Amino acid sequence: MTETPLLAVLSALRPDITTALVLPSVLAAVIGGWWQGELIWPNFLFAIISVLLSAFAFQMLSAYQDFQQSLRAEAYPATDLPNSAFTLQQNGLLHPIMLLNVGALLYTASALCGLWLALLAGWPVLFFGALAFLLQLGAVISPVRYAYRGYGMGELGVFVAFGFLSLISAYYAQTHTLSWLPVLGGLPISLLVLLVVLSQNLTTQRRDWLIGKRTLAVILGPERALDLNVFVAMLAYVSILAVTVLTPLPLWYLAGLATSPLAMGVFSEVNRSLTAPEDAVRLRSAALKAAFWTTLLCIAALFISRPG
């Protein structure tokens, strides 16, 4: 089937992964509203829309930079899944300059939402938002491009930008205070989002090796990268138990553990060498579902309980 320009752009946006990147912010905002006794809806909407737009922009720039990386003289010929943004750029169905322009437009819209949120909630949201913005740009834009340099910097950058910083910012927008509560309460979801990123990197492991993008999947190889995925998944669910015991979050927060079979069961069903791309895709799909449903269960736990 021939891809239309609109479908090509939607493919580059990667809405499933983008949705996962927003989940920590959603949970942190709800934790803030729960702690205050009321959710401030304008602040909630501007915070989430700002993160959502920046996540879309990050996906656009990542797709652009991956293709540019493949054009370097030292890169080997590489292919990707048929409907990926990388393949669409290779086939001329998606122009790289369009990705760059749309990414810039989305970041501009995200910044405007962030500025308006600062008027409503205070300047600290600008500080945390600016740090997240710099981390996102530094990951994919020259001359830094730290996501391509190895040592797990790309994965760590996503974890900090869309996890730690977004958790603090979204919580502050609700409470006007700084606290470790959203960081600890949002840690399980942030780890599951990291699992999504690690699984996505497994799906593109061979392509990334050929173009010289040194993700953890490339550095460790498929088998050890899969072991890392198992560890992160286990850590996410252990952290649910830990934060429920160590923080004022309600006992109902343990409901998030119900998704552990969804996240963990898939590991017994895939070939450890991940010789088939379909195996890595299944891991990513399971991680996405686990992140979404765990967030939903944790939010439900907050809605049916009261602080203290």
Image (cartoon, helix red, strand yellow):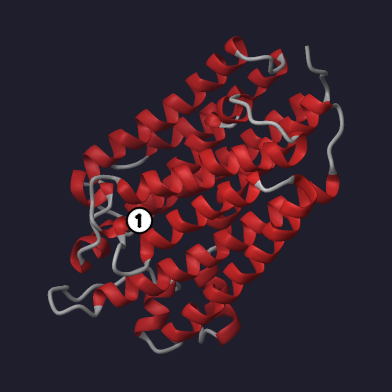
Give how far across and how far down residue 290 sits, in percent.
56, 38
Give how far across and how far down residue 17 sits, in percent.
53, 55
Q: In the current view of this chain or complex, which residue is farthest to the left?
A: 74
Dot 1: few (<14), some (14–19), or many (≥20) neighbours within 10 Å?
many
Which element carries disc 1, helix, strand or loop? Answer: helix
In the displayed structure, 269 sits above or below 212; it is above
Q: Nearer the viewer, residue 230 or 269?
A: 230
Residue beneath the point at 59% across and 23% down: 257
Q: Taking 28 as reference, is 193 left or right?
A: left
In the displayed structure, 251 sits above or below 92; it is above
Q: Is the C terminus in the top left, top right, bottom left or bottom right quadrant?
A: top right
- In the picture, residue 166 is in which quadrant? top right
The residue at which mark 1 appears reads as 203
Q: Can the viewer see residue 120 in this picture?
A: yes
Q: Can the viewer see residue 198 in this picture?
A: no
Give how far across and how far down residue 185 sits, in percent.
61, 26
Residue beneath the point at 53% across and 15% down: 242
Q: Taking 67 as reference, is 307 left or right?
A: right
Q: Nearer the viewer, residue 65 or 287?
A: 65
How many marks the image carries: the answer is: 1
Q: Nearer the viewer, residue 284 or 159?
A: 159
Give how far across and how far down residue 2 sits, in percent.
51, 87
Q: Nearer the viewer, residue 124 or 17?
A: 124
Q: In the current view of this chain or complex, which residue is farthest to the bottom?
A: 92
- In the picture, residue 206 is in which quadrant? bottom left
Q: In the current view of this chain or complex, which residue is farthest to the front?
A: 123
Residue beneath the point at 17% across and 73% down: 75
- In the picture, residue 114 is in which quadrant? bottom right
In the displayed structure, 142 sits above or below 88; it is above
The type of residue carrying mark 1 is: Thr
